[in-house]
Image: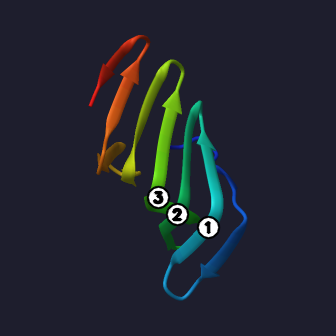
Amino acid sequence: DSRAPVVYDAGNGLFDDRANRAVLGGGVRVTQAGLTLQSNRLLIDFTNSGQLEIQRITATGDVTITRGDERASGDNAIYDFNRRIITMAGNVQLRRGSDTLN
């Protein structure tokens, strides 16, 4: 559910309102409606037309995404909130239950 609340936890962060961008680092963890994303660094692009709306999240460094018994890991991931698609690259591994795809 891309409209569910998004909760962030990170060691540090920088919010640039003029560029409509935030950068989080230091063990980043993002959760939304049962989906968890963990990475070393996170770049958040958003719009701010009266209400802050996330457009895209770019995760880099030891990226892991989990939901239930599904797990995806890789070097990088882009979560496009509008299209509701996560694209991963670099040493990608997908797991569902006991099945694994490298």
Kind of residue sitting beneath label 1: Gly
Residue that extends furthest to the top in the rendered view of this protein = 98
Residue found at x 49% / y 85%? 19
- Residue 1 visible at all: no
Kind of residue sitting beneath label 3: Gly
Query: How packed is label 2: few (under 14 Cα within 10 Å), some, or many (20 or more)?
Result: many
Looking at the image, is 15 positioned above or below residue 67? below
| Residue nearest the observer in this picture, 51 or 73 | 73
Residue found at x 62% / y 42%? 31
Q: Nearer the viewer, mark 1 or mark 3?
A: 3
Residue that extends furthest to the bottom in the rendered view of this protein = 18
Q: Nearer the viewer, mark 2 or mark 3?
A: 3
The reply to whether discs 1 and 2 touch (Cβ–Cβ < 8 Å) is yes
Q: What x and y, as percent, mark residue 95?
A: 39, 23
Which residue in the protein does label 2 denote?
42
- Quarter of the image with the C terminus in it: top left
Query: Left or right: 29 with respect to 41?
Result: right
Which residue in the protein does label 1 denote?
25
Residue found at x 61% / y 49%? 30
Looking at the image, is 83 positioned above or below residue 65? below
In the rendered structure, which disc, 1 or 2, sits on the residue that comes first in sequence? 1
Q: What x and y, as percent, mark residue 89?
A: 28, 50
The reply to whether discs 1 and 3 touch (Cβ–Cβ < 8 Å) is no
Q: Quadrant of residue 8?
A: bottom right
Looking at the image, is 23 positioned above or below residue 87? below
- Disc 2/disc 3 C-alpha distance (Å): 9 Å
Which residue in the protein does label 3 denote?
61
In the rendered structure, which disc, 1 or 3, sits on the residue that comes first in sequence? 1
Looking at the image, is 55 positioned above or below residue 64? below
In the rendered structure, which disc, 2 or 3, sits on the residue that comes first in sequence? 2
